[in-house]
């Protein structure tokens, strides 16, 4: 793995900062939730204490402590924003609740909905009675069987008044009451102030009635009777102390609650039954919150708290329920987080008890949308993410730049190390970056020290041949002179073989010393050679003529351009180069074989090629032929070979700024080419 990639990976570890930021944001959100719970709970408790000081502004009847009982005929009356039209339909009431069933038995089902305005009490009744029995012309409710709805009203003065609704034909009707005439006979008389609409349906009928408040006190009993089956739906009794109570919002309480709350908060006051007495405010998010929500949505994927186990908000238009309300009715302020059933948004609810004479007679419930908390969290999280991502990007950029610089410096050092030893064996001692004071500079200086020691050893090896040739020349002369003296004094015939082998060894040793000395002298002569301008074509012609005389058993061919070929160099060295190539070609060329010396112009260079017939060179050896002391002859002759001839060819070619190469010919044999620059 490259250093650049390693540093990039190290830089990417800074991504742990956003992860840590997410953990911090979650802890921050938890702390904000607890803080919001305490703040909302304290606000609810403050409002509850203020309302406890004026219970008459909260409860319509402060003395009534009897629990709500639907079986006794109690029902909740919803506030109506507009006065509905008496038509037997409930759509124009704009109440988000279904009618509640009336108590009763016998299979006669009836459902009631109640609403009020400033002037009227409205009653809506749905009765399941598919067999309609119309009211007779001269009706007597006590003895005549017909379908009707009985209504008992406690008037403002405390007296009870009974009415009933019945009709011979559906439509707009008035309530009727039974009065006793002067003759003692009961007769049904209409009450025009109480209007109703009787709507016949496939399942039974709907009754929508309107009662003026001057006729209604605090209790109303409703009973639906089936004239045919003699079944009924409604409370079992009409007790002036129990049942039939109207539970409804307290006038002016909503305006009072609105004084205590701020935008984005909804306040609800309830009685001991959890029934709503007043509501103010709304949970609508501000425009700024919506913008924050739009901008921070994608962050929430990383920090959203799992709320699947939180309770759902129990939606009821007439009462408040939940753990916080239950705790408040027990006398303890409490708060809880809820999930709305529709959009799964979060809602915080806090409830506090309204105490009257030390008893919890109701609650104040404050609700806030969770978006307010998310807005604060997202605002902090956005700043955190932006800062950490910017820091990560800068760290990655800096690390990548530093890695690129380090890789570039190491690459330069590697390239210099690869080329420190030239093709001619010379060692370049200078290394890049050696002047730097860091670890790379220390490494470069270490390379320089290593190359300096290697250069010293190489110089020693280069001069070793000449030193050995010089040192061994005297002992070898002594050996040869001793052999001469021994032969001159006469030796036995059986000793002649030993002397002959000793003389051959001495001759071979002399050849070795001469070759070593020649190699040393060639390197020295190459360094001291002088360059002159000469005609290479003329030089080749003279040399090839000499080779024909020296090697009569071989055939020589010369191919040169027709005009002069001038170049600048050392003619003696060029002749020596040609001698080595021709000697190598003669060694491998068979008798009567052809050796060709060819000179051609190729662009800005001369190409001097010497080719010969004979066996090809193994492909694996082509790149090593010009190395020092490399020899690939295997028993071709008894003459010593030390692998210095082609090495000297390479030294001379490089001295003239050229290059050498070897290749096999398609028709057989080999060709050695020396590229020499023109003048």
Image (cartoon, helix red, strand yellow):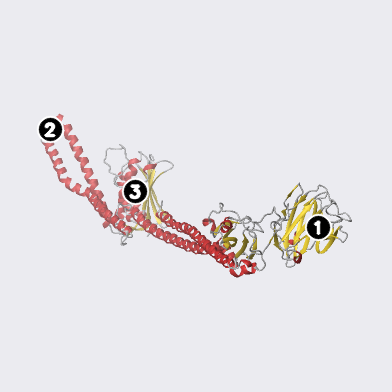
Mark 2 against mark 1, which lies toward the viewer? 1
Query: Which residue is rendered at x = 39% and y = 57% of the image?
Result: 407
Disc 2 packing (10 Å; few <14; some 14–19; many ≥20): few
Which quadrant is home to the C terminus? bottom left
18 sits to left or right of 549 = right
Q: Quadrant of residue 391?
A: bottom left
Numbered circle sitting on residue 491:
2
Q: Is residue 424 visible?
A: yes
Q: Is residue 553 visible?
A: no
**Circle nearer the N terminus (3, 2):** 2
Give x and y (percent) for residue 626: 33, 47
Residue in front for this viewpoint, 288 or 276: 276
Residue at far front of view:
183
Mark 1 against mark 3, which lies toward the viewer? 1
196 sits to left or right of 301 = right
Residue in front for this viewpoint, 343 or 599: 343
Give x and y (percent) for residue 173: 84, 60
Q: Quadrant of residue 273?
A: bottom right
| Badge 1 vs badge 3, beta-carbon distance below 8 Å | no
From the image, tell me which residue sits under label 3. Answer: 544
Residue in front for this viewpoint, 301 or 521: 301
Residue at far right of view:
137
From the image, tell me which residue sits under label 1. Answer: 164
Distance between the alpha carbons at the discs numbered 2 and 1? 170 Å
663 sits to left or right of 198 = left
Query: Which residue is rendered at x = 53% and y = 62% of the image?
Result: 36
Residue at far top of view:
494
Disc 1 packing (10 Å; few <14; some 14–19; many ≥20): many
């Amino acid at each position: 793995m490259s250093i650049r990639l390693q540093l990039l990976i190290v830089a990417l570890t800074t991504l742990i900062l956003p992860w840590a930021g997410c953990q911090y944001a979650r802890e921050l959100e938890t702390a904000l939730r607890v803080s919001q719970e305490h703040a909302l709970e304290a606000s609810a408790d403050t409002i509850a204490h203020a309302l406890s000081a004026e219970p008459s502004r909260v409860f319509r009847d402060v003395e009534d402590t009897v629990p709500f009982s639907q079986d006794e005929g109690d029902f909740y009356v919803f506030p109506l924003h507009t006065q509905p039209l008496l038509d037997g339909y409930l759509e124009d009431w704009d109440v988000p609740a279904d009618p509640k069933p009336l108590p009763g038995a016998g299979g006669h089902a009836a459902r009631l909905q109640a609403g009020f305005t400033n002037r009227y009490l409205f009653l809506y009744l749905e009765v399941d009675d598919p067999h309609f029995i119309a009211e007779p012309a001269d009706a007597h409710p006590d003895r005549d069987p017909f379908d009707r709805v009985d209504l008992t009203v406690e008037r403002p003065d405390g007296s009870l008044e009974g009415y009933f609704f019945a009709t011979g034909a559906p439509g707009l009707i008035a309530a009727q009451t039974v009065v006793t005439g002067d003759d003692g006979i009961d007769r049904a008389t209409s009450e025009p102030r109480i209007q109703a609409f009787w709507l016949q349906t496939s399942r039974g009928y709907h009754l929508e009635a309107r009662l003026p408040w001057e006729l209604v006190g605090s209790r109303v009993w409703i009973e639906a009777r089936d004239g045919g089956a003699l079944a009924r739906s409604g409370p079992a009794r009409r007790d002036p102390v129990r049942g039939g109570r109207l539970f409804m919002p307290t006038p002016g309480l909503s305006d009072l609650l609105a004084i205590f709350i701020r935008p984005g908060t909804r306040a609800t006051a309830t009685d001991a039954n959890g029934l709503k007495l007043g509501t103010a405010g709304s949970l609508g998010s501000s425009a700024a919150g919506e913008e924050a929500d739009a901008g921070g949505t994608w962050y929430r994927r990383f920090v959203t708290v799992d709320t699947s186990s939180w309770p759902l908000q129990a939606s009821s238009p007439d009462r408040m329920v939940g753990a916080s309300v239950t705790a408040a009715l027990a006398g303890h302020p409490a708060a809880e987080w809820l999930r709305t059933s529709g959009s799964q948004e979060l809602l915080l609810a806090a409830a506090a008890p309204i105490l009257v004479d030390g008893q919890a007679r109701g609650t104040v419930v404050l609700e806030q949308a969770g978006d307010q908390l998310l807005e604060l969290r997202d605002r902090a999280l956005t700043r955190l993410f932006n800062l950490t991502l910017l820091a990560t990007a800068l760290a990655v950029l800096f690390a990548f730049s530093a890695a690129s610089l380090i890789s570039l410096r190491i690459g330069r050092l590697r390239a210099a190390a690869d080329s420190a030893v030239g093709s001619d064996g010379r060692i370049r001692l200078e290394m890049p970056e050696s002047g730097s004071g860091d670890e790379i500079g220390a490494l470069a200086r270490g390379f320089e020290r290593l190359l300096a020691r290697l250069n010293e050893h190489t110089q020693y090896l280069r001069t070793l041949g000449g030193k050995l040739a010089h040192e061994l020349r005297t002992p070898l002369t002594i050996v040869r002179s001793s052999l001469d003296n021994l032969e001159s004094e006469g030796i036995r015939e059986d000793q002649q073989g030993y002397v002959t082998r000793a003389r051959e060894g001495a001759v071979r040793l002399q050849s070795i010393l001469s070759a070593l000395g020649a190699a040393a002298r060639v390197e020295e002569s190459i360094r001291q050679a002088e360059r002159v301008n000469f005609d290479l074509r003329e030089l080749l012609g003279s040399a090839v003529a000499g080779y024909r005389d020296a090697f009569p058993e071989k055939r020589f061919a010369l191919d040169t351009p027709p005009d002069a070929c001038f170049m600048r160099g050392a003619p003696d060295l060029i002749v020596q180069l040609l001698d080595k190539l021709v000697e190598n070609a003669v060694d491998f060329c068979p008798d009567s074989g052809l050796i060709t010396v060819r000179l051609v112009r190729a662009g800005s260079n001369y190409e001097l090629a010497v080719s010969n017939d004979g066996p090809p060179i193994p492909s694996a050896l082509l790149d090593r032929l010009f190395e020092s002391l490399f020899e690939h002859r295997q028993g071709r002759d008894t003459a010593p070979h030390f692998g210095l001839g082609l090495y000297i060819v390479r030294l001379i070619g490089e001295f003239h700024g050229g290059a050498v190469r070897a290749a096999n010919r398609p028709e057989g044999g080999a060709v050695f080419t020396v590229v020499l620059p023109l003048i």
